[in-house]
Structures are given as C-alpha cells and as structure tokens.
Amino acid sequence: MTSVVHNLINYRELIAALAKKNIVVRYKQAYLGLLWAVIKPVMLMLIFTLVKSFVGIETGDIPYPILTFAALMPWIFFQESAAEGVNSITSNTALIKKIYFPREVFPLTAMVTKLVELAIGFLILAALMIYYQMLPTLQALWVPLIIFYTMLVALTISLFGSALNVYYRDVAQALPVLLSLAMYASPVIYPLSLVKTKLIDEQAAGEWSNILYTIYNINPLAGIIDSFQKCLLQGLAPDFGSLLPGFIATIVLLPLSYLYFKKAENWFADII
Amino acid sequence: MPPIIEVKHLTKEYSLGTLTSAKDTLRHTLAKLRGKNTWHRENFKALDDINFSVEKGEVIGIIGHNGAGKSTLLKHLANITKPTSGEVIVRGSVAPLIEVGAGINPELTGRENIFLNGAILGIPKKTIHEKVDDIIEFSELEKFIDTPVKRYSSGMQVKLGFAIATSMDAEILIIDEVLAVGDLAFQRKCFNRMEELIHQQGRTVLLVSHNIRQVERMCSRVILLNQGKIIRDGDSHSTCDHFYQLNNKTISDQQQNNATARITSSGEVNIEQVDILDENNQPTESITEGSTLKIRIRFTSEKALIKPEFHVGTHTTDFIYLTGESTALLQEDFEFPAGSHEIEQHIENYPLVPGSYGIRAAVIDQQGCVLFHGESLKFFNIIAKTDDAPLQDELRLVATNVSWKGLTP
C-alpha cells in the first residue's frame, strides 16, 4: 500500500498531465465547457426535489434541495470515479501496450479528473448555501478527510474492477447498473437520519433492527454522505458510529483489491 | 561492474485462440475440480530460452523475420510484459521509443501533446519547458503547433512523435522501427538525430529494424532472432550477412514450394527440368557471387525442331528481367529430332549481387512461333564470396569491377 502513495508522488506530474488531458479532451469543443460537469447533480437535485414534494421525506430543518445536493456531490464523485476507473485500463490500450509506468496511474487519474469536477460542485454548493443563508462552521474542516476516504472507497472498486475488466469486459457493463442500484441503498434521496430513526429509535424490524442498521452502514457511502452533510450544512462532527462499519470494510478490501491489481498488471499488455 | 541488461533463460508463451466466455471458464474450472483437465489451449513460444547480456555503452541491433520475437523481446526489456519463465534484469532507466506517437492525443494541440507525452515518457516538466522550443523546431511544425493534432497530416503527426520521443534522456534507449518516418529529408534528419543520441555519453541502445543496412551501420553488435531463438549473436557485419543468406534461402524455399512457374506452351515442346550446375557440372541450388552461371535445360519435343531459337535468361523474384540471351544471334543452326534433349547456357562472371533469382526460357520455331515460354522455372541463390565481403544492399543489383582514382585538380 505504501507503494501506491509512493507512486502517487513519483508520478504526480504524469497523473496531473493525464487528468488535464481528460478534462481538456472532454470539454474542448463544448461551448458550456466544464459547466457540463455540474449539470448532472443539479438536474438530479431538481428531480429529487420535485419527487420529494409528492412523497414527503422528513429532512429536519435543512432545506431539501441543498441536503440532496450535498448528498449527490460525494455520491456522483464516488460513482463516476469508480466507473471511469474501471474503464481506465481498457481505454488506454495504446499506452499500456507501448510504455511502462505503474498501471495504477490510470485509475488514480480517473479519480483526479473527477476531483476537478467535484471542485466545481463546491461552487454550486456555495451558491446554494448563500441562497439559503447557511454558514459553514469549523466542522467543515472534516470535508477534505471525508473526500479522501471517498477516494479510498472508489479505489477499492476501481483497482479490482479495472483489472478484472481487462479479462472480462462484463465488469464495465455491469458496474453502472450496480452503482445506480447502490444509489438507492445510500442516503442520497433520503437522509441517513431517516433510516436511523426507523431502525434504531422505532426498532421497525424488530430484533433485527440494530443488525440491519449496521449492515446498511457497511456501505461506506452511507457514512460518507451523512458526514458530508453534517459537517458542511449542520455544523456537526461526523457520526463515527455510521462511518465505522464501512471503514472496516474498506480497510480490509482495499489491500486485497490492490494486490489483485498488481498481480494482474503483469499480463495487461498480453491480454488487453 | 555488472552488465546493464541481463536476460537469463527468458521464455514467453502466449496462448493461441481467444479468451473463453465465462460459461466455458466455469465449465473448465468445474472439470478441473473433478480432476479432469479440459483446458486445451495451444501455447505458442514467442521467445524460447533467450540468454544475453549487454554492457553499458553497447549499441545492439536486433534483427529477424516478422514474428521472430523482436518486439516481444523489447517489450520485456521495457517492462511492458513479464516473462513466462526466466529473468530480465535491467539496471538503469529505460526510454522506450517503441512506437512513435503512442501517446499522441488527436484532440490536443501539438504543444499540449508535447507536454502530455513528455509526462508519459517520464520527462520532468521542467526539462520539457527547457526543451519545448527545440522539439518544435526539430519537428518543423512551428506554424501548426497550436492546432489540434487531429487536423495534422499523418506525416506531421509522425514528425511530432519523433521529435518528442528523441528528446528524452535515459541510460537505455529502446528503438523499434522508428527511423522510417516522414519524407526523405526528414528521415535523413531522424537518422542523424539517432546517431547523435547513440554516440552521445556512451548510452546503451537497442535497435530493432528491418533496415539491415542501417542496423549494420549503427550497431557494434547484432542479435539475430529466428522463431523465438537467438541463432546468432556477434559482430554486426557477419550477423547481418548471415541474415541475408537466411532471407534469400527463405525466399527461394517459398518460391520452390509454391511452384509458381508461369508457363505458356503450344504443347509441342515441354521443358522437363532446369538445373543450375556448379564447377563440376553437378546440379546445385546456389553459386558464389561472380562465378560462372551454368543453366542446363532438358526439354522434350513432339516433332523435329529445325533451326529453333532458344531464349534463356534470369529474372529477380519480382520479375525484373536481368539477362536474356538468344541463340538467334548465333550463326550455328541447331537441329533436334523429336525426343528428349538438353541445352546449356553459360554466363561467365554472372555479375549479380547475392540474392535469389529465377530462370526463364522460351523456345521459338523457325517461323517465329513461340512453342514454349516459362518464367520462374527454377530458383537459385547467389551467395556472398566470404563473410567479410561488403554487405550487399538493396541499392544495387549488379556487381561490377571498378577501379578508383583520387585526383586533386
């Protein structure tokens, strides 16, 4: 694992150059340019807000649009980093067959590219906060750490997925489907507090309630989204209880995913 | 000091056929669990027990036919793929110029591509900043450098790729077929740049090329690969020459196997056999450069031939007629009764350079009617006199005796 960090430092210029290329290539001939990066969360926010007005979701004292936008930011960052990461090896066939550098540069680059788009999301969030007259507190300092943790989660999926995708292209086909399902299992449309109230306070599933709540939180995005909202919008510290199960899962799976990637890496140029 | 590159028992196998579907994989795995192996994928040895080492500062050429394993070998040295068995030790930084322009992105401008490719090749940003003007100047693209590469002509793209690739500093340079780029003037420039790179600071260079002349000129040592094995590893001259002979043999073998003789015949005369004879008048496949070429033709005739004209000549494998002499010029009158006969043509000091050549022959009757005409009736090789002879090149066909004079007017 230390070698990932090592590579990140050694190859930072390459990662930066490739990420810049990704962004330039994507938006070069587009009139709206980088604005396209935020169209997706903004549209989803509007749709969710519309739906919410029919079904009624309890969101406490935070206005729903900004709450769901703050959920969509880490979610879309995670979803797209993972999806692009999984494709990143197979879409760079020419480079893989011609030049050697550590192959994890590709999934890392996919993530850095998405980080730039996330940064633009923050501008929209800031605008929303001004509109709703909300001020960030010192707790907002947790945000970089939360994003870093989100990157680790995305890497867990993209390292394993991108390596497997070299052998079986099914992976890149299946992942978007799975991820769009996973959105409903994450507190994006609804807040985590709703799940917590139902399971912990009301014990809605009987004796299984506490276990179910822990299982729900094994999805690292549950804790991530909740903490992101808490730190930025509510001025609260992260809820470590909901972060813990997912964190343990990530800490166990990330090294395995990395090991698989490094093992498979040797044959990329032959198989791809 | 240990050698900068060491290759020990390097073997690389590829599975033939395609990767199977998940269903098949599952089936094979289940079968394996039951102790049966249903996995029948044929293996192909791209490299077979390769051993060599390279000292710092050596300039080594790697030659061989298509599919001999040259590029696979370079891929191992550049760490792009890993051996099936054996070991590759590289003690130094490697700059792989494996294909010019691998990292060029068509959407970016020339200048942006210089920076992107620099990063891909591991050149620090600072160094590229220093070199960017040189690179642009070398590529001759000053006017177009801020235009997206997708609007470049293919020649311009190649020029850009070459200019970037050769701007990097590394202890080991790996070059695969990159010199044949652009128009002649630019090729010349590339060639000079390569020589400059090679002779600079005692760099170690591995050069793969089909241009044997170039390899012979640039390299001090050449490795000849054939079907994944090293069949010769030695000084560039003798190895290149060996390769030529091998090449000629392959061509003539192919020609002979394919039996590509092109024959038109009236049916009255048929050529049965064509032989090339050595000094002892024994049939042979090859003669030495500059010796007498003896062609013996056995033919059968249905009827008596009175004053026929025989026309016998040689041609290259791509049907350029080289020699062609006719008996019509002779005052002698041949007469052959019906039956089997032989004629011989001797060419003293057959002047052609080493290579593979074909025989053509025609028989024409008294009235000027062509009774038989055939090309590629037989192939033979001209081989170099000695291993030390100047290497034959593609730029000449005929060897002549010349004398030189140096004058200062």
Image (tube, coloured by chain):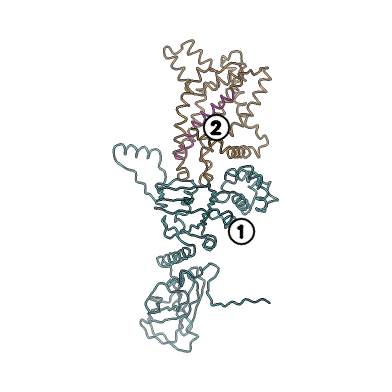
Chain colours: A orange, B cyan
**Residue type beneath disc 1:** Asn
Please tell me whether residue A62 is drawn above or below residue A19 in the rendered image. Answer: above
Q: Which residue is mark 1?
A: B192
User: Residue at the spot x=58%, y=32% of the render?
Assistant: A114
| Residue B334 vertical placement versus B211 (above, below) | below
Label 2 neighbourhood size at 10 Å, few (<14), some (14-19), many (20+)? many
SS category of the residue bearing label 2: helix
Outermost residue, right side: B143
Measured in 3D between alpha carbons, the distance from the residue under mark 1 to the one under mark 2, in whole angstroms, is 45 Å
Nearest to the eye among marks 1 and 2: give it.
1
Label of residue A81 in the image: 2
Residue A267's spot in the image, x, y percent?
A: 45, 43
Q: Identify the residue shown where x is 46% and y is 89%.
A: B332
Closer to the camera in the image, A69 or B290: B290
Residue A188 percent location from the top left of the image = 55, 22
Is residue A41 shown left or right of residue A104?
Answer: right
Residue under mark 1: which chain is it in?
Answer: B
Total count of labels: 2
Q: At label 2, which amino acid type do we have?
A: Ser
Outermost top residue: A202
Provide the chain ID for the residue under circle 2.
A
